[in-house]
Image (spheres, rainbow, N blue to C red):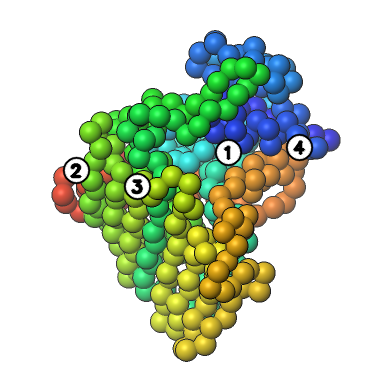
Amino acid sequence: MTARIGVIGAGFWASYFYLPFFRDHADVELVGVVRREEEGLDNFKRAFGLEVATTSVDDLLAAGVDGVVVSSPHALHRQHAVAALEARVHVLVEKPMAVKRADAQAIVEAATAAGRTAAVALGWNYKRLSIWAKEQLDAGRIGRVTSVTAYKASSLTAVFSGLSGYGVVDVDGFPVEAEANTWARSDAGGGYLYGQLSHLLGLGLWLTPAEPEDVFARASFLPNGCDNDIQVSVKLADGIIATYNGQGRRPWAIRHSYDFRIAGEEGVLELDMEHVRAELLLQGALEAAEVLHVGPEPPPYSEEGMYSCDGPAQFLVDTCLGREVPNRSPADLGVRTVAVMEAAWESAHSGQPVRIDALAAV
């Protein structure tokens, strides 16, 4: 038995990761792709042995799929995910799940109505460090959480400026590059907040799942209006305060920064992907995750600390095949993440805090 999988939005990331992953997966029949332009469709069909390569979502769904990845431009995620769910197909939505909370919530409601699963492609949530950290927090090891401090840095200024892509993927002679229409449109989720802080928020709001209540943000903006430096302060239920900060100016070819410091009444949990370290600090004691490297000089390119989307992609396959596996990036988490980002975008422009319950409903 195999899962029939399709991809809506065959751009750079799908060409680089999803299509090779599913093509080479023993439990998957890679059915087809959807692209906005007809140019290159034949190349995709040959390169990945597809049944369907089309500009029509309806054509892909009509071919018969069990699950789809939605990796189209951010502002189109609702349209494409809902169409798939209404066809009773499981959906994995690339991050950010949507640009507006109302759109993310509409995807959740469509999944509920269809009796199908919707998840978000938050690959960090499936890393061993993250899973270990979640287990410690859920077990109450640091007591009641009081604050969260998180930081991420990437080499993406040129991408968010619309000046270049993120390299080129050759698909049977057809070049595919990250598009400015996706990553550098300030009115459609372009910039660091939606493009990268979504990773940080998606993990942080999973580790500490209290509901966000209000948001205050400051940002610096590129000439095209996209943010490239962002600081987000979030008040969560239960009195938790959280800060999520990030910037796209890290020099090229230097490993990303990605870390959390989560404080509780009985200790602190520290999670550092850059240095491949996860620790509990409990009343003067130190307890490190056994499977992880802990030391002054971690392996510079250890896979454990590098981003991978294998976890969410495998979750889609397992779900299509009826396997019972944990969903570490559920759609309701996506809604909370999008809500914080939408409020942060409004706050960064208005200079005022924004309450989550003041955002537009579905």
Q: Residue at x 38, y 49 (%)?
A: 250
Which badge, 1 or 4, comes first in the chain's sequence?
4
Residue at 70% in and 40% down = 317
Q: Is residue 168 above or below residue 354?
A: above
Q: Nearer the viewer, mark 2 or mark 3?
A: 3
- What's the distance in space between the residues labelled 3 and 4, CA to CA? 36 Å
Q: Is residue 324 visible?
A: yes
Residue at position x 60%, y 62% from top? 299
The residue carrying mark 3 is 249
The crowding category of the residue bearing disc 3, from other C-alpha atoms within 10 Å (few below 14, some 14 to 19, many at least 20), is some
- In this rendering, the count of numbered labels is 4
Residues at discs 4 and 2 in contact (Cβ within 8 Å): no
Q: Residue at label 4?
A: 25
Tell me the distance, in whole angstroms, between the alpha carbons under discs 2 and 3.
Answer: 21 Å
**Which numbered disc, 3 or 1, marks the residue that appears first in the sequence?**
1
State the separation of the CA atoms marked 3 and 1. Answer: 29 Å
Closer to the chain start, of discs 2 and 3, is 3
Residue 92: which numbered mark, if any?
1
Q: Are marks 3 and 4 in contact (CB under 8 Å)?
A: no
- Hey, what amino acid is under mark 3? Arg
Q: Residue 318, percent across and down?
A: 72, 44
Residue type indicated by callout 2: His
Q: Is residue 343 left or right of residue 349?
A: right
Amino acid marked by disc 4: His
Instruction: Choose mark 3 or mark 4, whichever is in front.
Output: 3
